[in-house]
Image (tube, grey):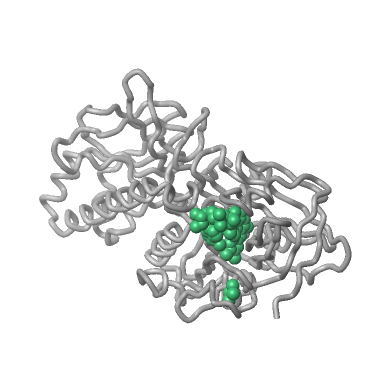
């Protein structure tokens, strides 16, 4: 099944802000559109921006020497793409490539940092929302490590429904 | 007390994945009462044993459709049956997905692995009466692309809203990778007016229910299907007990408001 085109317009990060904070942050947003198959960033590069996806999906991958790239997660409309800009060493942990035509709000990290320093309430709301996304991804990763759908019993943790 | 199984013949069989088979059964004589979505039968593989298996499609006269994943002796024996083979069947047992509770509301049907099998009759019901319901979303997660069930039916689910995701991509998979809850971002529903139907491993159901509650879906509007080993299926032997519930009788489908406190207790 392919993902439905369009999808949630807003993004959970933006939804966490008040109307005023949302307005302020959006003055820094740049509307970007990229075709499918575009490398957005590479592992280890400087993480100087982030995106809130409006439509399309993005695959996050990791390079495995001698084995090519392995996709570890895909994210779609409504999701935050990139949180490495928030904390040192501010380098991308993974690489990102568009799977489908992609539309997003792009934010420059330095400009957002400056805005957060100026309006600390906005800064706290934004950091809390980004932390929530990071927590969500961590929980998802841990759940996947359980190999839930694998064979039931001691090997896999899931009971066959 | 426990009614004797009726004999059913395998009239059709289909390999869904490397370890999962769908069997279509027809009564050899007397037929069981009709099943409703979410209910299960006790399927007896002659000489091996009897296990609970949900109905995975309704209709077609007295025929029964079940999708079985081979995990142990009995399920392997059932998966190994060929057309013309015989099975003993008791049922219908248990509670049903309460589709009526979703009349006029948006629906989220969320499945993990073989959990899609018990949910398929519910999806069929909704697709047959689209005007009775709000927006339908079918979200399915599987371990790998080759573990996905019913791939030929995806196009029909895609049209309302459907998406699948796998934990481990392989074999040129270009779809989603990640847990099934990540698909919620794109599903189309109004949390305050949504009924969710969730089936999969218990940890998956818990994580999904928590994500739904966080988004504003009421716990009593989240239905989950709980499983325990079953023997009599008639509420007498106590094998399927979970706290105050006997899941063969009070389940498998229960509201998350009722299930949540039971699922988070380590031992009951
Ligand atoms: C209400 C209900 C509906 C079910 N619907 C389906 C279905 O539609 N399709 C399907 O393939 N399976 C379904 N199951 C699960 C199925 O009953 C078990 O896979 C089966 O009992 C395993 O028996 P076995 O003899 O093949 O394996 P066993 O040798 O008994 O067990 C193999 C492994 O399966 C685990 N197991 C055994 N019984 C259960 C159980 N009841 N639930 C979870 N894990 C179990 C054991 O812990 C062991 O790890 C359902 C279970 C219930 C309770
Ligand atoms: S299986 Fe015997 S009481 Fe439920």
Work out which quarter of the rendered image holds the N terminus of chain B and state it.
Answer: bottom right
The residue drawn where x is 53% and y is 45% is B164
The residue drawn where x is 51% and y is 72% is B221
Which quadrant of the figure shows ligand 2?
A: bottom right
The residue drawn where x is 81% and y is 46% is B83
On the rendered structure, is A13 left or right of A159?
left
Q: Is residue A17 above or below residue B76?
A: below
Depth check: give the residue in front, B17 or B111. B17
Depth check: give the residue in front, B112 or B53. B53
Instruction: Point out the residue furthest to the front here.
Output: B47
- Residue B231 placement: quadrant: bottom right
Q: Is residue B40 visible?
A: yes
Instruction: Point out the residue furthest to the left here.
Output: A117
Q: Position of residue B123 (x, y in %)?
A: 65, 58
The residue drawn where x is 11% and y is 51% is A118
Work out which quarter of the rendered image holds the C terminus of chain B and state it.
Answer: bottom left
Q: Is residue B116 visible?
A: no
- Residue B132 placement: quadrant: bottom right
Q: Position of residue B34 (x, y in %)?
A: 77, 69
């Amino acid at each position: 099944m392919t993902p439905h085109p369009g999808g949630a317009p807003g993004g959970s990060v933006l939804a966490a802000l008040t109307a005023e904070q949302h307005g302020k942050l959006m003055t820094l947003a740049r509307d970007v559109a990229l075709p499918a198959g575009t490398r957005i960033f590479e592992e280890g590069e400087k993480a100087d921006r982030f995106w809130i996806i409006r439509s399309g999906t993005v695959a996050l991958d990791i390079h495995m020497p001698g084995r090519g790239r392995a996709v570890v997660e895909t994210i779609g409309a409504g999701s935050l793409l990139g949180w490495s800009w928030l904390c040192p060493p501010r380098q991308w942990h993974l690489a990102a490539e568009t799977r489908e035509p992609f539309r997003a709000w792009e934010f420059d990290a330095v400009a957002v940092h400056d805005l957060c320093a100026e309006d600390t309430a906005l800064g706290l709301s934004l950091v809390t929302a980004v932390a929530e996304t990071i927590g969500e991804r961590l929980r998802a990763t841990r759940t996947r490590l359980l190999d839930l759908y694998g064979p039931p019993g001691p090997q896999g943790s899931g009971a066959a429904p | 007390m426990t009614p004797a199984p009726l004999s059913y013949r395998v009239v059709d069989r289909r390999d869904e994945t490397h370890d999962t088979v769908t069997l279509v059964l027809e009564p050899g004589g007397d037929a069981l009462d009709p099943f409703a979505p979410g209910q299960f039968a006790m399927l007896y593989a002659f000489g091996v044993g009897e296990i609970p298996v949900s109905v995975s499609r309704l209709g077609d006269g007295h025929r029964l459709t079940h999708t079985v994943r081979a995990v142990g002796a009995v399920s392997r024996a059932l998966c190994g049956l060929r057309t013309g083979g015989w099975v003993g069947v008791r049922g219908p047992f248990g509670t049903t997905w309460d589709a009526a509770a979703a009349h006029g509301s948006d629906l989220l049907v969320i499945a993990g692995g073989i959990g899609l099998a018990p949910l398929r009759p519910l999806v069929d019901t909704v697709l047959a009466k689209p005007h009775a319901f709000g927006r339908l979303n079918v979200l399915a997660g599987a371990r790998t692309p080759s573990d996905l069930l019913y791939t030929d039916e995806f196009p029909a689910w895609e049209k309302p809203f459907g998406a699948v995701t796998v934990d481990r991509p392989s074999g040129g998979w270009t779809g989603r990778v990640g847990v099934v809850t990540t698909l919620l971002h794109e599903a189309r529903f109004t949390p305050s007016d949504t009924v969710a139907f969730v089936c999969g491993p218990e940890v998956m159901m818990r994580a999904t229910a928590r994500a739904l509650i966080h988004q504003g879906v009421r716990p009593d509007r989240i239905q989950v299907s709980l499983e325990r080993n079953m023997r009599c299926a008639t509420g007498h032997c106590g094998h399927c007990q979970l706290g105050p519930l006997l899941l063969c009788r009070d389940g498998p489908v229960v509201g998350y408001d009722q299930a949540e406190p039971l699922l988070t207790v380590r031992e009951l």
